[in-house]
Image: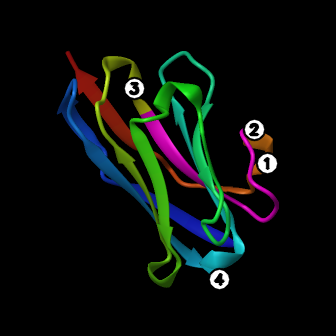
Amino acid sequence: QVQLVESGGGLVQAGGSLRLSCAASGRTFSWYGMGWFRQAPGKEREFVAATSRSADSTYYADFVKGRFTISRDNAKNTMYLQMNSLKPEDTAVYYCAASGRMIGIAVEQYDYWGQGTQVTVSS
């Protein structure tokens, strides 16, 4: 088992930056692949980015390529999402997730979820 807590969300103007953090506790953090998802009101949860257990592999949704960077610090049991050049359409609740299997873009591939952190981008 692993427990996940997101932080770092907030209100930012278009073009600004935020860094989200996901703190993990429980089983060894490095055993899990990790991902970020987001969900806007009335919309389905969508994949944002993922990183493998050793962070040797990353994957990004097309709409964030070149703007967001996923990283992890296994020694600190923390995953990050650096978000630059934010757009109003990035407004959503952002969730971190952990997978005991290979990473992917589907919600079903992840076993554990945080409560989410709100990101609001104004124009």
Q: Which residue sits at x=60%, y=66%? A: 55
Please report contact status of discs 2 and 4: CB closer than 8 Å, yes or no: no
Q: CA distance from mark 3 to mark 1?
A: 23 Å
Residue located beneath label 4 in the image: 28
Quarter where residue 52 is shown: bottom right
Crowdedness of circle 2 by 10 Å Cα count: few (<14), some, many (20+)?
A: few
Q: Quadrant of residue 28?
A: bottom right
Q: At label 3, which amino acid type do we have? A: Asp
Residue 46's x, y, as percent? 61, 30
Give the residue pinned by disc 1.
Answer: 109
For marks 2 and 3 on the same chain, the one whose residue lies earlier in the sequence: 3
Earlier in the chain: of badge 2 and badge 4, it is 4
Task: Tell me the distance, in whole angstroms, between the alpha carbons under discs 3 and 4.
Answer: 31 Å
The residues colored magenta run: 93-106
Question: Of label 4 and label 1, which has the lower sequence position?
Answer: 4
Disc 2 versus disc 4: distance between alpha carbons?
23 Å
